[in-house]
Amino acid sequence: MDSIHDLGGMDGFGPVRPEHDEPVFHEKWEGSVLGLQRSILYLGLWNIDVFRHAQERIRPNEYLSWSYYERWTHTLIATALERGLFSDEEFRSGIAGAVSSSAPLVPLTSRDTDKAFVRGNFEREGMGEPRFCVGDMVITKELRITGHTRLPRYARDKIGTIIAIRGRHVFPDAVVSHGKEDPQWLYTVEFEGSEIWGEAVDSTVSNLIDAFEPYLLRPEYD
């Protein structure tokens, strides 16, 4: 979906000012939020794509005013309520009700901690060959969707060149829209800087974007 989370190419936010010697966490509670998020993902009730889409649905004024881990906190609460991890009454009272037998919870022990922080493998085996080859020129689609997508606005309807084929991967758009993995071929596409940012950009600049096959067309024929 197109909302405030997709900031690439937008103006008016001022310069990026990196923080010197930035700590991992600015407040102690932020570490607790990270641990909670990873622990809940370990339960398998949702994945990173669902979590990202929940952040995308935050109201723009709130998205810009909250800190990084404040957004995570609100996203965790909203997603847990949507997925039935706890009820609205339980959340407001702070008192857990009876555990539903339809969604049994698996205790996370200290032995499982490392597993909770291991990045998942989203590559999938499957039949069929990739539609595009390295060196092919492609154009990204001009998407207008209300769901989740990994193709940023600034990279839509742009011409680039396939420089790598990354295999078949879980398709985030499908995971969010209908809960299916629907694996798709993933490519690294290189765009000239001027194609993305205009003629005023440094001529040595290029942009690399990992794009799923459904995002891409052949400029000459499609």
Image: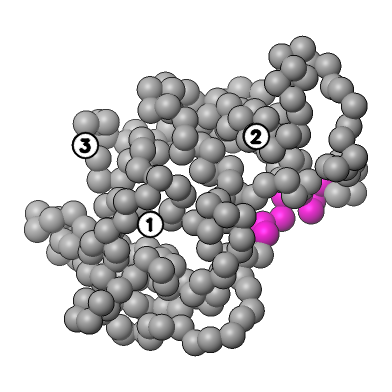
Give the residues drawn in magenta, as a range.
113-120
Disc 3/disc 1 C-alpha distance (Å): 19 Å
Indicate which disc residue 69 carries.
none
Residue 177 in percent (x, y) is at 53, 52
Is the C terminus in the top left, top right, bottom left or bottom right quadrant? bottom left
Is the N terminus in the top left, top right, bottom left or bottom right quadrant? top left
Q: In the rendered view, tell whether residue 96 sits above or below residue 101.
A: above
Q: In the rendered view, tell whether residue 138 sits above or below residue 136.
A: above
Residue 95 in percent (x, y) is at 83, 16
Disc 2/disc 3 C-alpha distance (Å): 34 Å
Residue 21 in percent (x, y) is at 49, 34
Q: Residue at x 35, y 43 (%)?
A: 2
Indicate which disc residue 82 carries.
2
Given the image, on which type of amino acid does mark 3 rest?
Answer: Asp
Q: Residue at x 47, y 71 (%)?
A: 186
Q: Secondary structure at mark 2?
A: helix
Of labels 3 and 1, earlier in sequence is 3
Given the image, on which type of amino acid does mark 2 rest?
Answer: Glu
Viewer-nearest of discs 2 and 3: 2
Q: Which residue is farthest top?
A: 93
The residue under label 3 is: 11
Q: Secondary structure at mark 3?
A: loop
Residue 145 in percent (x, y) is at 37, 50
- Can you tell which quarter of the image residue 178 is in? bottom right
Q: Is residue 1 left or right of residue 120?
A: left
Mark 1 burial class by Cα count in 10 Å: few <14, some 14-19, many 20+ = many
Q: Residue at x 74, y 40 (%)?
A: 40
The residue under label 1 is: 151
Q: Residue at x 59, y 85 (%)?
A: 127
